[in-house]
Amino acid sequence: MTVVGTNARRYEGPDKVCGRAKYIDDHDFPGCLFGVTVRSSVAHGRIRRIDFDPKFPWSECVVATARDVPHNSVLLIEQDQPLLVDEIVRHAMEPIALIAHPRREKAYEALRHVHVEYEELKPALTLSQALGTEALIFAPDNVFKRFLIEKGDVEAGLRSSHFIVEGEYRVGHQEQAYIENNGMAAWWDNGGVSVMGSMQCPYYVHKAIKHMFGLPDEKVRVIQTATGGGFGGKEEYPNMIGGHAAVLARKAGRPVKIIYDRGEDMAATTKRHPAVVRHCTGLSRDGKLLTQDIEVIMDGGAYVTLSPVVLSRATLHAAGSYECPNVRVRSQVVATNTPPNGAFRGFGAPQTLFAVELHWEKIAQATGIDSLTLRRRNAFREGSITATGQHLRQSVGALETLECCVKRGGYERKRKEYERFNRDPKKKCWKGIGLALVHHGAGFTGSGEAHLASRAAISLTRQGEIKVLAASTEIGQGTNTLFAQIVADTLGVPYDWVAVEAADTGRVPNSGPTVASRTCMIVGGLLQQAAHLFKKEVVEARGSFPKTRKDMHLAAVSLCNGQPEKRFETQYQTPAHVHWDDKTYRGDAYGVYSYATVVADLEIDKTTFEVRVRKITTAQDIGKAINPLLAEGQIAGGTAQGVGYALYENVVMKGGVMANAQLTNYIIPTSLDTPPMDVVIIERPYSEGPFGAKGVGELPMDAPGPAIAAAIYQAAGLLISELPILPEKIAQAKSHDQADG
Amino acid sequence: MRGAPDTIILLRPRSTRQALEVFAQNPHAVPLAGGTDFMVSWNMGLHNGKTVLDISALRSWRKISAAKTGVRIGALATHADLQRHPALRREFSLLTEACSEIGAAAIQNRGTLGGNIANASPAGDSFPPQAVYEAKVHAVSAQARRLIPFNEIFVGVKKTVLRPGELIESVEIPFLKPRPSRQYFRKVGTRAAQALSKTVAAGLLWLSRDGRVSEMRFALGSMATMVRRLKSAEHFVQGKKLTSEVIDHACELLAKDVSPIDDVRSTAQYRLKVSRNLLREFLSGR
Amino acid sequence: MIKLTVNGKKRAFCGPPFKRLIDVLREDFRLTGAKEGCGEGECGACAVLVEGQAVNSCLIPVCQMDGRKIETIEALGTVQKLHPLQEAFIEEGGAQCGICTPGMLMTACAWLRSHRAPKHSLRAHGARPLLKYGRGTYRSPQDIRRVLAGNLCRCTGYQPIVNSVVRAMKRHRTPK
C-alpha cells in the first residue's frame, strides 16, 4: 500500500483539534518562575546606570544582567549580538536585564520599577542615515555584507538593447504574526541545562546555549514543544529567549519560563527585511531580455543575525525565473539602529521577486508587448542558464505553471473584459487581473547544505516500533506526517507503523534547521536513504521484510541484539551534479528550484480605494506532493501571507520602534480578506528529492505581491511600486476623485 | 496577563439600586459592562489597583423594548442582542448594521451599547447611527436621573459628560416620522472585518415631493475626537435640489465639521477624501 | 466564591474574582485548550462558549461568569471520538500549527448549532451561495468566512478551514 501522494491523516492532527497538543505555555514546571525582560527605550545609547527602585520588594525576584552571562552572545553567523546589553544599546527594545518572579503579573509589575539611564547617541534609523554613516553601527561603513553576481557583459548588453527600462521598487517590514507568541522555559540539573519551547531549530539553540555557558554537547538538551507557527520568526530568536531563560534559571536555581505577550513579540523580535531594488533592463525589439542590471539594498537592523544569508537568497533570486545573457546583481545589507530583521518565509526572495516581477509591467508599458508575452519569451525552460551560470537540466515547470494559471484564471479573457469594464465611469469599482511567475531555490544556498552535513535516522526499537529521528520541527507545515509517509512507503509498511520522535536534541540527530524549504526535500531524502539502509539490513538478516507487526517485533529483537534500539542513520552528501563556488558566486546556487504562478483577480472600490481580492488562481511546481492536502495547505497559507504583504501589513516605525505592535493595528488578513483560491499542484519530479519532491514552504509567499500589484495597475492605472499597497496610497495616487466621474 | 487581579477592588452589585448606591459611595470606581475595551487595557497592566464596578449582573438593563414613540435599548444589551431585535432591524437598520460590523462575533456577543458610549472611543461604530437617529441617553445616579441628547454626551477622546456616580441606564431612539427617503451606513476599516474604523458614516435623508431636501443628517466617526454631525453640510443642502454642484459644495463643507488626524491606521488626507466620497455616495444615491 | 459550570461539571473558583476566565480555565482548571494569542480580543485563539455563544476568554473577568455555563474545546470531542467538526478539520487540513484551532472550532460550533442543517449537498469552491437551509435561506462559504472573521489564522489561508466547516455541515445535518 502506498501512502506517498495521498492525503494521509495529519500525524498530530487529533491532538490539535482536541486542544490536547501542548505548547510551551501549556506546560507546567513545578516551582517555576516567570521571566520578563527589561528593554531599551532608546535606539542608540550608552547605559549609564540601571536603577532598581528600592520601594519594590526585589527579594521576591531574581534579577540577571550581562554580568550573569558567561559568554554574552546569541551566536548566529557572527558574535556581535549580546544576550543582554552590557554597555551600548544598538536598537530600541533591546534586552538589558531579566527579572523572574513566581507570579507573572508581579514580574511585569517589577518592570515598572527598573529605570535605565542612558547617554543617548545619534541613531541611524533609515537606510540613508546608515549609508551616510550618521551613526557607526558596524565598522567600517555599516554594511554587513555585499554580494556581486556577474554573467556576460551588462554594458555590452545595454548597448545592443532596443528598449531600456528602469524601475525602483520598495518593500517594508513584515511581521511573521504566528498566533503563538515566542516562549521558552529552562531548568538546570547536574551541571547541565534543559531548554524547552516554541522553536524551529533545536540545534541552533543547542549550539548557542553551549557557547553561552561553555558547556559540552551532552550538558545541553533542547526540546521543541508544539509550536504555534514560525514562518521564520522562530528560527533565530529562540536562541535569545532560550538563553534568557537559561540565565535566569541558573541564577534562580529553579525552572524559569518566559512567554512574550503580543506587544513585546511584535516590537522586539525579527521581521522581514525592508528592501529597495533597482532594475535597469535592456531588451531586444521583440522583447527578449538582453541585459539585467540590478541593485539590492536591504535593511538588516542593528545586528548581523542572519542578514548575510537573507541577502544571499535575495541576490540569487533577483533576476527572476528568466534567462538573460548579461546579468549583474549588486547587493548589500545595511546596519540600522532598529531591531534586527531576520528570517521570514521566503528569506529575501519575496523582496527581489516583487521587484523583478512588477518590473515586467513597466517593461510592457515601454515596449508595448504585454507582460504575459514577455514572460513566455524569457522564462526558464529545461536547458536555461541562470544568472550564476547554473544549467537547469531538469524539473523546470515555470512555463507549465504559467500556462496552467493563465488558462484556469481566465487571464487573457478577463484582461480584455476588465479593460472594457474600467472604461465605464458609472461602475462603482475598477477591476484588474495580474500575474506573477516566480522560482524558489530549495534547501540551503550553494554549499550551505554541504556545510550543514545534516543527519537523520530511523530507529527500530526492541519492541518493533519504527521511529523517525530528526531535529526538523513540526510547526504546522506537516513535517511529522511527511516523514512518516516517506518512511512508510520506502519500507513498504503501513503509515501507522511509523512514529515520529519529538524534536529533542537528547534523542534526535542534527538534521539541520527547519527553514529554507528543506525539510521535505533534504531531510525527507535523508530519511528515505535511512529507510533503504534499514530495509536492506532487515532483508539481509531475515531474507525478507516483515509483513506483520508481530514479524517486525521478532526482527527487531534479533537486530537490536540486546540493545533498546537499532539506529539507521544517514548524512547529507552533495549530489554529484551540484557545483558551487562561494568566492565567485557562480555555479549551482540550489540543487533545484520550485516554480509558481499566481493570477490575482481583484476590485478596487472607487469610493474607498479598498482593494478586495476576489480570486487567486495558482499553479505550483513542487516536484511531487508527498501529501497533496498538506501541500495545498502550504500554498493557500503562504498565498494569504502574500496577500497580507501586498495589501495590509504595514509596520509603522517611529523612532526605531514599531508603533503598531498589536494585532489590532498591524493588520493581517481575516477570513474575509482572503479570497477563495484555486490551487493546482504541478509535479515535475526532481531526481534527488524523495519521490521527486522539491521545496514548497516558501514558494507560495513570493508571487502574490507582484501579481496583486500588477492587477492594481490594470484596475486603477497606477503602477504602485511599493508594498504594502494600502488604500491610502491608491487614494493619494489618484490625483482626482473619480467617484463622481 | 499584565493585569494583577488581586489588586482590584471589585464591586459587584446585584440590583440597580444597589449599583447606584455603591457607585455613589465609590465615585472613582470604573464601571464595567462587557469589558471588550476595558479588558484590553487591563491586559496591558493599565488598571492595576483600581476599583471596578461590575454592573453586568443588572439583568433588567439588558432589555430592548419598543414603545409608541421609539425603542428603548438597555445599556447592557449586547451588539448581538441589538442585531437580533426585530423592531431595531426594521426601524433602525443603520444601528443594527453598525453593530454587525463591530469586531466580530465574539466581540458582538460581549460588547454592550451602554459600555460603548461610556467608553467614548472616537472610533465607536455605533455612534454615527445614534447621532443621526438623535438618540437620547438615560443616565441615572443615586440622586437623580437625566436625559442627555446623544449628540451632547461626548466631550473628548474617552470623555463623556457622565459624572462620577452616574451610569447609563438605557438609550432611547425615537421612531422616524416620516420615514426617511434614504438611509446610509458605511464603515471603512483597516480590513473587511475585525477592524477599527478609519472613517465610519451614517446618513438619513428626507426629500420633499419636488425633490428638494427637507432634512439631511450625516455623521462621521473616527474623524475627530468624537463622532461629528456635519452641521454645515446638513444646513447647506436644506431646501435644495441635490444637483452635482450642490453635492460638490456639501462635500467641500464636510471639512468644516471634522478634524481627522494621521495615526497608525490611516492618514488625515485619506480620511477626508474617503469621507467626502461617502457623503457623495449618500447624496447622489448610489 | 464563583460557581460556574464548565463542560457540564459544576466548578467553584475561590481565587481573585477579577482573574480572567482564560487564566482560571488554564491555570486553575488545567484546561489549556484555549490559547492566548494577543490579549486584546483580536485573534480569537482564546474563544470558548458561554451559554452557547462564542466569546474571547481573555477579555472576561471570571466574576462575570458566576452561574454561567461554559464550554471549551476539551468538551467538544475526544481523540477516540471526534466531533464532526474536529473530524472535518483533520480531513480538510483545517488545522496546521493548531494554535488557532480550538478557538476556531468553538466559534464554528456555536454557529453550526444556531443554524439549521443544510438540506442539499454543498461544494467547497465557488462564490455562489451554495448551502441551502430548511427555510430557503442560503448560507454560502462567504457566510462561513464572516462567522470566522474574529478568529485569526496565519497558517492555512482560511480556505481549508472554510472547507472543513462546509464538510462538517454536509456530513452531519445536526451537529451537536
Image: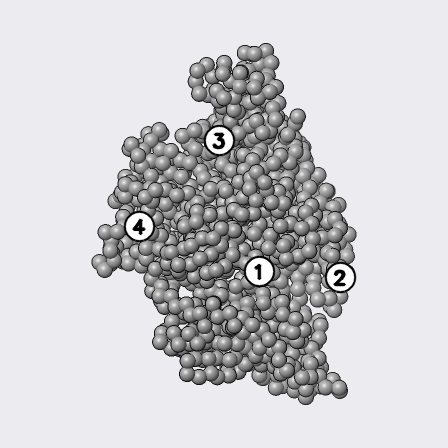
Residue sitting at 75 percent across and 61 percent down? A421
What is the residue that sits farthest to the left in this orientation? A54
Name the residue that disc number 4 marks.
A101
Amino acid of disc 4: His
Residue B105, which numbered label?
1
The chain containing the residue under callout 3 comes to: A
Say which quadrant the C terminus of chain B sits in: bottom right
Q: Is residue A275 above or below residue A504?
A: below
In three-dimensional space, the C-alpha distance between marks 3 and 2, rounded to whole angstroms, equals: 57 Å
Task: Let me know if residue A519 appears in the view.
Answer: yes
| Camera-side residue of A52 and B151 | B151
Amino acid of disc 2: Phe
Name the residue that disc number 3 marks.
A501
Q: What kind of colouring is applied to the model shown?
A: one colour
Residue sitting at 66 percent across and 26 percent down? A1
In three-dimensional space, the C-alpha distance between marks 2 and 1, rounded to whole angstroms, equals: 36 Å
Say which quadrant the N terminus of chain B sits in: bottom left
Name the residue that disc number 2 marks.
A421
In three-dimensional space, the C-alpha distance between marks 3 and 4, rounded to whole angstroms, equals: 33 Å
Amino acid of disc 3: Glu
* Mark 4: few/some/many CA within 10 Å (<14, 14-19, 20+): many
Q: Is residue A233 above or below residue B87?
A: above
In terms of sequence position, does the residue under pointer 3 or pointer 4 come before the other? 4
In three-dimensional space, the C-alpha distance between marks 4 and 1, rounded to whole angstroms, equals: 37 Å
Q: Provide residue A700's location: percent of width, then percent of height.
A: 60, 44
In terms of sequence position, does the residue under pointer 3 or pointer 2 come before the other? 2
* Mark 3: few/some/many CA within 10 Å (<14, 14-19, 20+): some
Residue mark closest to the camera, 2 vs 4: 4
* Mark 1: few/some/many CA within 10 Å (<14, 14-19, 20+): many
Residue sitting at 35 percent across and 55 percent down? A105
| Camera-side residue of A566 and A280 | A566
Amino acid of disc 1: Ala
